[in-house]
Structures are given as C-alpha cells and as structure tokens.
Image (cartoon, helix red, strand yellow):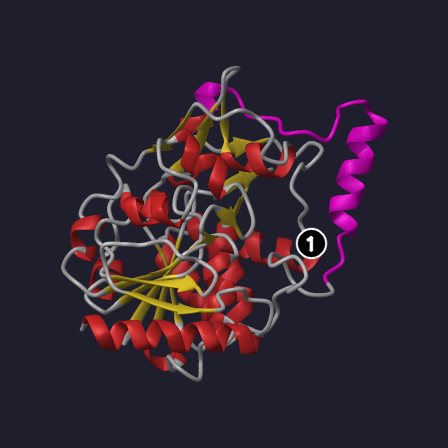
Amino acid sequence: MVTFLSGGTGTPKLLSGSEGVFPPAETTVVANTGDDVELGGFLVCPDVDTVLFLGGDKLNRDTWWGIAEDTAQTHQEIQRLATEADLGTGPRYLDPEKQTQGREIARWRRFSGVGEFMHIGDQDRAVHLTRTGLLDEGQPLTEVTGTLCEVFDVPFEVLPMSDDPVSTLIETPDRTMHFQEFWVARGGDPTITGVEFRGAEHAQPTSAVRDALDNPVIIGPSNPVTSIGPMLALDGFEEALESTPVVAVSPFVEDEVFSGPAGKLMDALGYDSSTAGMAEAYPFADGFVLDTEDSTNLDRPVVRTDTHIESKTDASRVSHAVQEMLYEIR
C-alpha cells in the first residue's frame, strides 16, 4: 500500500504511468482542497477532479484539468451575457459577510457566477453540480468524492485532504486574493508577500486520510507551497509524515522549475527556489528523486533519473525511481 499526496499537475502526471509499479488497488491519493472555490453556487475542486478524471480516463491531458473533448456552451454563454451587459469576466467575490454564510466548506472562497472567470466545461459542470447537491444533502466531501470515483470507475482511492474548509489565499502589496484569482485570472503576475491557508488552524485530516498516512507516502513533483502546503498546515499531518517513509520527487532541476508558480511562491516564503529549497520545505522526507542533470547535494538519500514527465513511459520511469528510493529507506 502507498499513498500519493497530490496537487496541481505534478503528482497526477506521475500517477499517469505508475500502475505498473504501484498497483491501483493498493494506491490511495490524498488531494489538496485549498484551491477549491464556490463559483456561482457550486463547489469546484480542481485538484480532486484532476485525479478523478485521470483515474476515470477522462482527463484532458493537453491542459491537465477538465474533461477531454468537453464542450463549454454554458460557460461561453455566461461570458457572453456578462460582456454584453458590460459586467466583465474577471473574478467577482461575494461580499465579506457572505464568505462565511451558507455551506461551511465554501468559506472564504465564494465567487459570483457572473462572467465565470474559470473555464468550466459542460460535463465538468455536471460533476460540480452533483457534488454540490450531495453536499447540500448532508454528505461530507469524502463520501461525495467516493461516490464520484465509483461513477468514473477510478481504480485507486481518492481522498480530499479534509472535510473542513481550508482556503489558499495569496497576499500581495495591493490586497489578499484567492489562489484561483492569482493563478487563473491574473496568470501568477502579482507580487507575493505571503500565503495564508485560512481555516487550517481548525481543520482536521479525516480519519481516512490519517489511516492513509500510515502507508509509505509519495509526493510527486507538485508545488510545495500551494499544492502540498495546505495539507501540511492541517493539525497532525506533518507529524504523521514524520512517522512513515516519505519519498519526494523534486519539481525543480536545481533552480529551474518544471512549470507553474512554485519558484515565485518558494521565494515569497523564504525558501530557495530550487531543489535545495524543496528539501528544506520537506524536513519529514526520508529520500528524494532528482533529475540526472540536478547536482544538488542533499543531506538525505537521493536517486536520480530523468524526471521530465511528458508520457506514461516517462511516468513509469520516475515511478520506478521512487520505488527504488522506497526500498532504500524502508
């Protein structure tokens, strides 16, 4: 049994070719929920859905989000209406007092549906509406996710990191904004002065997540700050990682990041934007998988391979390196 910690696209890419090394029936994926938003009344869980669609063989592998060949007629019409009414298509937060009203899991991340700044496909929207309906019927997010996994015939277990609200907020010189505004609407351009995982001080990992963390843990080449950071902010999560074998794949080759805003976020939190900074951010990790071109010297065991993942073959190669590292540290 192994457990993957997943956020963004890094760990899903590793999972895409891991089945020959880590049997899906013996694999659990704990997904970040700090990026979730309530948009026009329905809950969007981007990192949960990426592994959901991946496991169901529905994922758009060009973008690594959404459903392959999905249409977006509703989204396009929403944007047309907003444009015609001169309302714009940028993020529109609900009023501060409404951020803590309604369903608890959507706290601090509620956006109006006007203009719909995030691209939502038609089949994708059906997933969000079904999820939200089940939540409103009283089911916790973990149970809802399990139901969706059954529908999509996902071969591994998918667990949201918590059934409690945690919202990743990016602090900038002008104001604090949700991560989705920072990354989706603004392309990661604003200067970062800090990152807050709002609600994490009261949120708990579920019992299912705690059990999963008893297994050896694999952290793919995901963003250490906004993909993995919300999990580490949960009570007892990092302590659990200290008590089990953990292997992390670097999202860097020395000081070059594969993709996304990881480097900028690491800099903002006082870490080197590099493999060395990643290792510092993961003091609980027992070993690392680095790229063959990465000469970083770490104080813990290292296995090197080509860590660029563009295909299932690449993902399988990196998965074998992870397995080799696990054998060494166990």
Residue 121 lies, with reference to residue 107, above or below; the image says below
User: Residue shown at 27%/76% (left/top)?
Assistant: 1
CA neighbours of label 1 inside 10 A, class few (<14), some (14 to 19), many (20+): many
Residue 92: quarter of image: top right
Is any atom of residue 127 visible in this view? yes
Residue 248 lies, with reference to residue 317, above or below; the image says above
Q: Percent position (x, y) of residue 297?
A: 31, 54
Q: Percent position (x, y) of residue 43?
A: 51, 45
Q: Is residue 29 magenta?
A: no
Q: Percent position (x, y) of residue 252?
A: 46, 52
Q: Is residue 92 left or right of residue 51?
A: right
Front residue of 80 and 181: 181
Find the residue positioned furthest to the top. 174
Find the residue positioned furthest to the left. 243
Q: Three-letter amino acid code at disc 1? A: Gly
Front residue of 49 and 328: 328
User: Residue shown at 39%/82% (left/top)?
Assistant: 21
The residue range painted magenta reads 70-98
Front residue of 317 and 42: 317
Q: Percent position (x, y) of residue 238?
A: 21, 49
Q: What residue is shown with label 1? A: 121
Q: Is residue 84 magenta?
A: yes
User: Residue shown at 45%/65% (left/top)?
Assistant: 292
Quadrant of the rendering where the C terminus is positioned: bottom left
Q: Label 1: state its secondary structure.
A: loop
Q: Is residue 176 left or right of residue 81?
A: left
Is any atom of residue 102 visible in this view? no
